[in-house]
């Protein structure tokens, strides 16, 4: 896939994919969660700047969030089954 030329702020990504901005900020706080080069820091005139994602980074984020939700459902199902067995 060709390298994206566009960088989307986390706020814009949240709107684009219908996710909570705070969740996206938390997930991207660890740069290991997104492929190298797909999460970038952008100077915006503020002291800290802002983070942005490439189109590939957005895809990585979507995949990660889907995986997290799958793990949560599987974990909840497993816990429910274990609780039922131990009763």
Image (cartoon, rainbow, N blue to C red):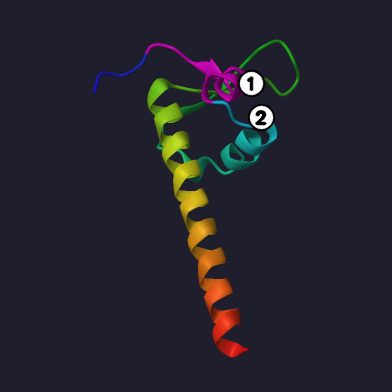
Q: What span is colored magenta in the figure? A: 5-17
Image quarter where the C terminus lies is bottom right
* Label 2 secondary element: helix
Q: With respect to residue 67, does 37 lie above or below? A: above
* Label 1 secondary element: helix
Q: Label 1, on which residue? A: 11
Q: Are marks 2 and 1 in contact (CB under 8 Å)?
A: yes
Work out how far the residue at label 2 is from the one at label 1, CA to CA, in angstroms. 6 Å
Dot 2 alpha-carbon crowd within 10 angstroms: few under 14, some 14 to 19, many 20 or more: some
Dot 1 alpha-carbon crowd within 10 angstroms: few under 14, some 14 to 19, many 20 or more: some
The reply to whether the magenta stretch includes residue 12 is yes
Image-based side of 42 in relation to 37, left or right:
right
Question: Residue 85 or 9: which is nearer the viewer?
Answer: 85
Question: Residue 60 or 48: which is nearer the viewer?
Answer: 60
Q: With respect to residue 78, does 19 lie above or below? A: above
Which is more N-terminal, label 1 or label 2? 1
Q: Label 2, on which residue? A: 21
Question: Residue 11 or 71: which is nearer the viewer?
Answer: 71
- Residue drawn at the location 67% of the way across and 20% of the way down: 49
The percent coordinates of residue 35 (x first, y second) are: 40, 37
């Amino acid at each position: 896939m060709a390298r994206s030329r566009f960088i989307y702020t986390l706020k814009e990504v949240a709107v684009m994919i219908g996710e909570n901005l705070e969740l996206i900020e938390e997930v991207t706080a660890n740069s290991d969660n997104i492929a190298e080069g797909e999460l970038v820091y952008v100077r915006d005139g503020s002291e800290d700047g802002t983070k942005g994602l490439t189109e590939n980074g957005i895809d990585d984020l979507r995949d990660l969030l889907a995986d997290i939700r799958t793990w949560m459902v599987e974990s909840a199902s497993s816990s429910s089954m274990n609780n039922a067995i131990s009763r």
